[in-house]
Image (cartoon, grey):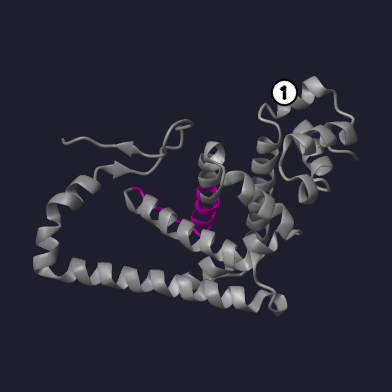
Amino acid sequence: MANSDPKQQLLDAALPHVPFDGWSAATFAAAIDDSGLDPSLAHSACPRGAVDLAMAYHEAGDQHMLARLADENLSELRFRDRIATAVRLRLEAVDDKDLVRRGMALFSLPMYAGDGARAVWGTCDHIWTALGDTSENVNWYTKRATLSGVYASSVLYWLGDDSPEHANTWEFLDRRIENVMQFEKVKAQARDNKIVSQLLAAPMSILGRIKAPSGTQQAGMPGRWSGPK
């Protein structure tokens, strides 16, 4: 049964063209022709053309990762290994690296850099949420920001990795996560140091007013500010 979602129809039709023409106007025009959709319907479903399709492709990869994560038994893994597993599953959701390369070329353009950042942030938010993160303060942001750096650098390494079954990428990913764990260890030591903790009391008090996004928030930057009581 054919998919009735116009955006999905366009995405399916666009994928064969992306390795050659990128996420471009030419690809979007070819997708309209190949899908047989009315052009007005196509432009209604994707007002920004191929940019919207590139974002839809990225989100589809996220959903594939989440489906596989739901089937994984992570209970025996250390938390750092759960994160590594999630990142690995996200990379394995990609069938063709050229689709990602073309996406990176698109999102490197200044006018679409924000979209690229939102895509990476969204992936990391999906991972933390799937792994049960319950942060309600500034930690909600720092966790996702840190993982965004790990994920983005791993994608870049993976794109150039031709080792068997991407073994070098998984080793690279483990090293990046180890770097993060060392940083967290230093933070913990600073909190336990009486002098350092006193020096940080004022800025931490300010950061403590930053709250994670509410369930009803739909627009703007995520999160909210809690003023002095």
* Extent of the magenta region: 121-136
Q: Is residue 131 magenta?
A: yes
Quadrant into which the N terminus falls: top right
Residue 203 in percent (x, y) is at 17, 50
| Image quadrant in which you'd find residue 214 | top left
Q: At label 1, which amino acid type do we have?
A: Ser
Callout 1: SS: helix
Q: Looking at the image, which is closer to me, 218 or 93?
A: 93
What's the residue at 70%, 30% (across, down)?
46
Q: Is residue 24 magenta?
A: no
| Relative vertical location of residue 114 with respect to residue 19 in this rendering, above or below | above
Q: Is residue 41 left or right of residue 223?
A: right
Q: Is residue 73 left or right of residue 40?
A: left
* Residue corresponding to mark 1: 44
Q: Looking at the image, which is closer to me, 109 or 2?
A: 109
Magenta span main SS = helix
Mark 1: give few (<14), some (14-19) or many (20+) Cα within 10 Å.
few
Residue farthest along the top direction in this orientation: 40
Residue 210 in sight here: yes
Q: Is residue 11 left or right of residue 154?
A: right
| Relative vertical location of residue 47 with respect to residue 27 in this rendering, above or below | above
Residue 78 in sight here: no
| Relative vertical location of residue 115 with respect to residue 197 in this rendering, above or below | above
Q: How many marks?
A: 1
Residue 123 in percent (x, y) is at 55, 52
Residue 111 in percent (x, y) is at 54, 36
Quadrant into which the C terminus falls: top left
What's the residue at 57%, 70% (across, down)?
74
Residue 193 in percent (x, y) is at 14, 70
Q: Is residue 165 left or right of residue 105?
A: right
What's the residue at 52%, 66% (across, down)?
83
